[in-house]
Image (cartoon, coloured by chain):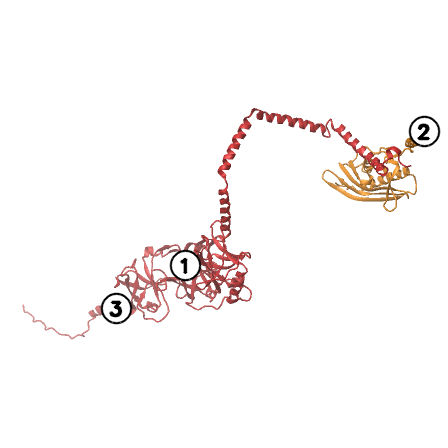
Chain colours: A red, B orange
Amino acid sequence: MSEEPLEAARVVKTGRFSSVLILPIVAIAIGISMVWYHYATLGPVVSIHFKTAEGVIEGKTQVRFRDVIIGVVEKVALNDTLNGVVVQVQMEKAGEPLLKDSSRFWVVRPRVGVGGVSGLGTLLSGAYITVDPGSGSEGTRSFQGYEQQPVTDSSTKGIRLKLKSQQANSLKVGDPVLYHGFEVGRLETVNLDVERREVDYQAFISAPYDRLVTTRTQFWNASGVSLKTGPDGFRVEVGSLMSLISGGVAFDVPEGLDPGEPVKGHHQFRLYQDSDSTRERQYKVVIKYLLMFDESIRGLTAGAPVEYRGIRVGTVKEVALGVLPETYEEIKPESRSIPVLIDFELERVTRGKEKTSPETFAKMMDQSIHEGLRASLKTGNLITGSMLVDMDFYPDTPDVSIETIEGYKVLPTIKSDIVRYKEDASAILAKLKALPLAETLVSIRALANDTRGLVNDPSMRQLPGRLDQSVQSLQQLLEDYSSQGALYPGLSDSVRSVQDLLWQMQSLIRTLNEKPNALIFGQDR
Amino acid sequence: MFRYLVFPIAVFLMACSSPSPPTYLLLNPGTEILTVGGPVKKVSVRLASYLQQPQLAIMLDNNEVQFSRRYYWAERLDLALAGLIQQQMNQVLANRQGDWSVAMQVYRLDFSDDGTLVLSGEFEMRNRKGTIEKGAFNLMRDVGRMSYPGQVAEMRMLVLEVAKQMAQQAPLNE
């Protein structure tokens, strides 16, 4: 057995690249491409500030635009002041064009309100963030999120207006803006201006209705039901069903006025309490007069009408002692009159005619006062007790000099009818009081006792029976003398005989008148 | 002595000498009872003052009235006129039903010595509801010179004519 020597190994040089490496290389390449694709499709990370992160979950809550996913919430954290949250969203590349200066983000959650139900789909899918792309330049990475969906899309055409009011008027974001009951827009924001202590509303009027808003347009609160009591009685105003439920704002151009020019965006208007207030504001040319009443003015309030023989000529501006300064008592210490400031609204008096200047009107008023023009209080509504100021001429009143107090001319007053009646009634009561009622009552009582004694007298008790007998006798007598009675024919004959005798006597009397001795000598032949 | 009695005896004899007796005339002799009943239930006549006496009033010229000393009405003139008019109206309105009364006011009922008769006045017809007709009448008739009894007969015809005219003016529907 021989051992064969081992054959020396033959080294064969091969290439450096092994086919085995293909697989991992491919895998690596795929991984790299995936990573590249991942980063290539990633958009920027944006920060959105919300008040609360309710329903927002890191890594799960999506950002959608028209239901297309354009990002995912990456991180949710409290802000530095702890009064809100910052939501960091990893946007996709496709969503980057949506990130503009005025883009608006809000969280879509299930909501139930008087305006309706929304976001029911998120009950199963969970809340998500959506965006309304605004206008402006791209590149913004930090946004202030909205708690609710903005009232109008940024793509909706129309104009935005500023409305200012002294009160919030129970209006809120989303309330409708109505024109003749038709919804033409909505309130977008409600803010309180602390400096001016006014409530600022932003209203959006959709095109083409924005052309209805002109410089003479007036806005008023048309929310719910308005029940007013005044000298005119009760009045109920009800808006549309929607405004009845959720409130609303109405606008129009006052009747009889030129509409004016169309307005541009962000024009500022005053929001009036109601439609009546807009009418009152039409009268801008006013002359103020002061009335000094020496009686109770209960029932007279600011806004009450001032009438001249039933025609409204002005408005009570202020009913208070505060109209006058503290030095009033020094001006007229003997008086305890209550001042009432009124406005004569010249447009009411001169409507449709050539305008009367305030100076001319003041001269006419001076002359009228000298001729007996006086103001008095009148009851405007018996149910509510509302009062109004009535003016009329009372020529019998003495002439007075026209006073001026604190720059206001004083229009003389007379006592109201009620006060005059009260004074008359007081005078009558005073006279009644002066009557000797006690003595009269004693006399009446004595008379009653006497009468009682008379009635109880036996002969008096027989009186009715005797009266009855007398009446029966009289009745029988009358029946006898009636045309059907037994005595009538004889009586009638007697009367006729007397008439005949008088008939014959006429001749005799004439004969004796002509010839007094005719009884002896007879008549001439 | 006897000569002192002559004057009283003469006065006595003159007083005893009676004139001729007066003549009494009837406006409505009642020789004809024309109708019984009728719509006119009552007629009342009111005479002018100068007619309210029995002597015939004779109209002379110049609005002068003379009362006859010989001719007298035998009955009250207002009653005679009422009866005559009621009879005549009921005869004319014999086929009518009603309960009417007539009030007459006679202003003139004159006999004149030249033979002219005048009868004028007013009348008013009433039913239970009120006045149904009012009117006036003024009739003249020239009968020529004739005796007063003859003129009374003519006056009777004049009264009947007035009553007929009044009846004809009565409305058909009350």
Q: Which residue, given by chain and number where applicable, does mark 3 sit on?
A: A35
Q: Chain of mark 3?
A: A
Q: Nearer the viewer, residue B136 or A207?
A: B136
Residue under mark 1: which chain is it in? A
Residue corresponding to mark 2: B2
| Residue A261 image position (x, y, % from top left) | 48, 69
Q: Can residue A473 be seen by looking at this rendering? A: yes
Q: Nearer the viewer, mark 1 or mark 2?
A: 2
Q: Secondary structure at mark 1?
A: helix
Image mark for residue A33: none
Q: What is the x, y in percent for residue A21?
A: 20, 70
Query: Considering only order in the chain, which callout, 3 or 1, is on the residue closer to the N terminus?
Result: 3
In this view, the residue in front, B92 or B100, is B100
Residue A281 lies, with reference to residue A451, above or below; the image says: below
The amino acid pointed to by label 1 is Glu
Classify residue A354 as left or right of residue A103: right
Q: Is residue A275 visible?
A: no
Mark 2 lies on a secondary structure that is helix
Task: Tell me the quadrant of the picture where the C terminus of chain A can be found.
Answer: top right
Disc 2 packing (10 Å; few <14; some 14–19; many ≥20): few
Q: Going by the picture, which residue comes out furthest to the front?
A: B1
Front-lying residue, A67 or A359: A359
Residues behind callouts 2 and 3 on a single chain: no
For disc 2, the chain is B
Three-letter amino acid code of the residue under disc 3: Val
Q: Is residue A151 above or below residue B38?
A: below
Distance between the alpha carbons at the discs numbered 1 and 3: 91 Å
Q: CA distance from mark 2 to mark 3?
A: 201 Å
Which residue carries the number 1 mark? A329
Disc 1 + disc 2, Cβ < 8 Å: no
| Three-letter residue code for mark 2 | Phe
Disc 3 is placed on an element classified as helix
